[in-house]
Structures are given as structure tokens and as C-alpha cells.
Amino acid sequence: MAQAKTLNPEDLEKVLSFINTQRHVERNRAMMLLTHWAGLRIGEVPALRWMDVVMPSGQIKDEIRLLSRMTKNQTARTVYVSQRLKEELKHYTNQARCIE
């Protein structure tokens, strides 16, 4: 089976620019960057729960633990969260809390 293509930085910027023109910008941007910067599969993103990403204190976790039921191969794994992804997720969580 052929390897799936990945986005180069210019393509990612185009996708993010498009997302900025749509509804639910912060949510969709966070989901896109979880796939691109953290390497989550598209099916793993909707399986995430708030507590998988955010500590009770409100801080973004350094790593996300994916349970076996959340992954394609039914194998648990850990995904490390970069500083720039943490900043994006923090922006999203702040925006989501304002809505509640």
C-alpha cells in the first residue's frame, strides 16, 4: 500500500487559511493541527476526551495517551504535545470555556 502524502508548510497554511473562513475556526484548527503536528490519525481525534488533553488545572498535558480502543491497530500509544501545539490547544480551550 502506498504511503499517504503529507502536507508541506505551504499546503498547511492554505488549509488553515481556508479553515479561518469557516464556522468553528478554533475547533477545526485544533483538530487539523492535532493530525499534522502530533501525528494523530483522523479517527483518533474525535475519540479524544477533554480530560485526555487538559489537566484539571486547565493546563494542556505534555502527552496524550491514546487507549487501545481509540487507535486503528487497537494498540495504546502516547503522543507528545509540542509547545506550539500546546499554545494552539490552550487558545481553543480558552475559547471553548467562554461558550459554556
Image (tube, rainbow, N blue to C red):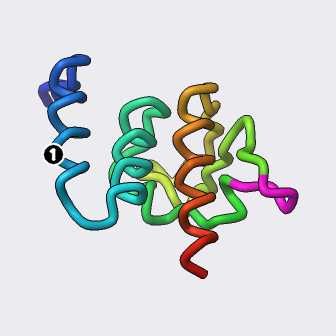
In percent of the image, x 56 and y 48: which residue is there?
A: 91
Q: Which residues are magenta?
A: 54-58
Q: Is residue 74 magenta?
A: no
Residue in front for this viewpoint, 40 or 9:
9
User: Considering only vertical position in the picture, is 75 above or below 9?
Assistant: below
Quick one: quadrant of the C terminus? bottom right
* Number of other residues with Cα within 10 Å of mark 1, as a class: few under 14, some 14 to 19, many 20 or more: few
**Looking at the image, which is closer to me, 81 or 94?**
94
Left or right of 85? Residue 45 is: left
Q: Is residue 44 left or right of residue 65?
A: left
Quarter occupied by the N terminus:
top left
The structure residue drawn at horizontal position 62% and vertical position 58%, both measured from the top left corner, is: 94
Viewer-nearest residue: 95 or 37: 95
Instruction: Return the x and y of residue 85 as percentages of the image width and height.
Output: 54, 34
In the rendered image, the vertical position of residue 63 relative to residue 76, given as above or below: above
The residue indicated by pointer 1 is 18
| Residue at disc 1, secondary structure | helix
- In the rendered image, which quarter is residue 41 located in? top left
- Mainly helix, strand or loop, the magenta region? loop
Q: Is residue 16 left or right of residue 86?
A: left
The residue lying at 41 percent from left, 55 percent from top is 26
Which residue shows up at 87% across the image and 57% down it? 57
Q: Amino acid at mark 1?
A: Phe
Q: Residue furthest bottom?
A: 100
Eyeballing the image, is 2 above or below 64?
Answer: above
